[in-house]
Image (tube, helix red, strand yellow):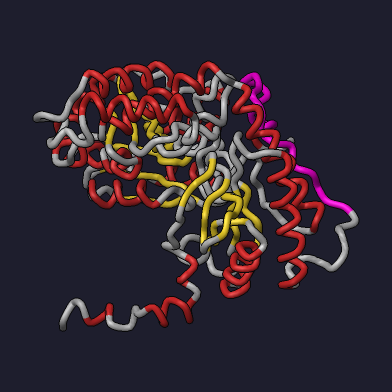
């Protein structure tokens, strides 16, 4: 059979009929990181993970431009051969300290940072992964050829059952997101690490969505709970306003992975512009905690404004706001209605979520204004009533969301659960 035959039906008409024309839509221009030109109109961007609003910061842009002027646009080789700069090492050192780890290595993407785990996940090892983990963690397991046993999302009791039933001689690793990218909830890191200690397992946390958001200094879910996972990974494309990824952990582990991970050995180095942008963003993140406070304030108001209209935003207590719109076709129609009303959101349908659990993922940044927040809520009110997702009149009552805030470790579990 011709392997290309399966592609024949994927025409523009097929994409339109199946609603997939909502994806891969080109943006013409951006304005201060909060609005974009889309379809010839200026709309509010409410589907970005630039949580601290730093991608448009003049200092971050200047750092990237300066790096291009000094080093060019590409280094033309892998880090192992000709692509290592002192700039890479400066960012790696800063991230290791920030994340409370001994060492770190920077990759060209967050996906690659997670794939770098593969040499630790061999055929004789057992991996225990949350059902809602980012797909890049699953791909790392596949690449390493370990056996993965999935535990129910956020269910440490089920995780404990799986660990109890596991071969005691096998190497064991627990993989989890810090903040889950669709549901917006926070992993039960204390429960996970307690089980890991009892069963001789290591813990790896992908902090892509919690770095810059959780913890007294923004160092992520580990700092939020006052705990240190064995290994932390993260994309640099969220709060650090760049493109790339990082993996941080004990020095000997990072050195081992540098020489054994194909992800690191056989890819071109992260570009100087991206590395410089991430380093500048990290410094601003640490120096300006008001940005984190601002995005959390906006998120709480967004959650509660949507709930007051009659929407459900799930278990999220973070800036990731999943608005439940059951039914694939209805979810995609809502996306179009919101776009018509001047708001760009992210439709999440199968296989990104289970069928019947479709959501519009909405995120605001520290750069969005109060006026833009009100426009987003007004658009959801109009579109929701037009599509029959919410009632014609305002909700009579709702359970308010208490957004996650920096807290002492003893109180962190209650805060994370919205208690």
Furthest residue to the right?
A: 396
Residue 55 within the magenta-colored segment of the rendering: no
* Residue at x 54% of width, y 37% of height: 51
Quarter occupied by residue 292:
top right
Furthest residue to the front?
A: 40
Stretch in magenta: 397-415
Residue 403 within the magenta-colored segment of the rendering: yes
The relative height of residue 50 versus residue 18 in the rendered view (above or below) is: above
One can see residue 19 in this view = yes
In the shown orientation, is residue 257 left or right of residue 43? left
* Residue at x 49% of width, y 30% of height: 57
Dominant secondary structure (helix, strand or loop) of the stretch shown in magenta:
loop
One can see residue 156 in this view = no
In the shown orientation, is residue 21 left or right of residue 312? left
The relative height of residue 372 versus residue 13 in the rendered view (above or below) is: above
The relative height of residue 17 versus residue 305 in the rendered view (above or below) is: below
In the shown orientation, is residue 42 left or right of residue 176? right
Question: Which image quadrant: the C terminus?
Answer: top right
Residue 323 spot, x, y in % from top left: 65, 56
Q: Nearer the viewer, residue 102 or 304?
A: 304
* Residue at x 90% of width, y 56% of height: 396
Quarter occupied by residue 289:
top right
Residue 280 spot, x, y in % from top left: 41, 23
Question: Which image quadrant: the N terminus?
Answer: bottom left
Residue 256 spot, x, y in % from top left: 19, 27
* Residue at x 33% of width, y 43% of height: 167
The relative height of residue 329 versus residue 101 in the rendered view (above or below) is: below
Count of residue discs: 0
């Amino acid at each position: 059979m011709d392997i290309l035959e399966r592609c024949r039906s994927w025409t523009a008409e097929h994409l339109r009929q199946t609603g997939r024309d909502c994806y891969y839509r080109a943006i013409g221009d951006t304005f201060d990181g909060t609005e974009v030109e889309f379809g010839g109109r200026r709309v509010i961007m409410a589907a970005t993970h630039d949580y601290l609003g730093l991608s448009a910061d003049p200092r971050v842009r200047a750092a990237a431009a300066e790096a291009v002027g000094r080093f060019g646009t590409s280094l033309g080789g892998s880090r192992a051969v000709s692509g290592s700069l002192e700039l890479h090492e400066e960012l790696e050192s800063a991230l290791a300290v920030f994340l409370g780890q001994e060492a770190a290595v920077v990759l060209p993407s967050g996906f690659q940072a997670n794939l770098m785990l593969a040499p630790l996940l061999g055929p004789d090892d057992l991996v225990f992964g949350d059902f809602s983990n980012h797909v890049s963690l699953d791909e790392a397991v596949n690449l390493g050829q370990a056996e993965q046993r999935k535990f129910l999302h956020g269910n440490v009791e089920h995780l404990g059952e799986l660990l109890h039933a596991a071969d005691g001689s096998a190497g064991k690793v627990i993989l989890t997101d810090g903040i889950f990218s669709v549901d917006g909830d926070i992993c039960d890191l204390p429960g996970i690490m307690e089980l890991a200690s009892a069963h001789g397992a290591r813990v790896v946390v992908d902090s892509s969505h919690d770095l810059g958001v959780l913890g007294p200094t923004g160092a992520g879910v580990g700092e939020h709970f006052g705990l240190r996972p064995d290994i932390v990974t993260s994309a640099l494309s969220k709060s650090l306003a760049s493109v790339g990824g990082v993996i941080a952990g004990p020095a000997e582990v990072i050195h081992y992975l540098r020489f054994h991970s194909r992800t690191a050995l056989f890819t071109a180095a992260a570009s100087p512009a991206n590395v410089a942008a991430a380093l500048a963003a990290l410094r601003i993140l640490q120096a300006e905690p008001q940005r984190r406070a601002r995005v959390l304030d906006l998120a709480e108001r967004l959650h509660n404004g949507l709930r007051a209209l009659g929407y459900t935003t799930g278990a999220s207590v973070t800036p990731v706001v999943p608005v439940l719109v059951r039914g694939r076709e209805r979810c995609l129609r809502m996306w179009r209605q919101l776009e018509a009303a001047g708001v760009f959101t992210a439709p999440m349908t199968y296989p990104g979520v289970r069928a019947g659990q479709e959501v519009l993922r909405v995120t605001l940044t520290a750069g969005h204004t109060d006026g833009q927040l009100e426009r987003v809520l007004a658009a959801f009110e109009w579109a929701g009533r037009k599509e029959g997702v919410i009632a014609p009149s305002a909700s009579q009552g709702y359970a308010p969301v208490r957004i996650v805030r920096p807290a002492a470790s003893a109180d962190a579990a209650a805060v994370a659960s919205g208690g």
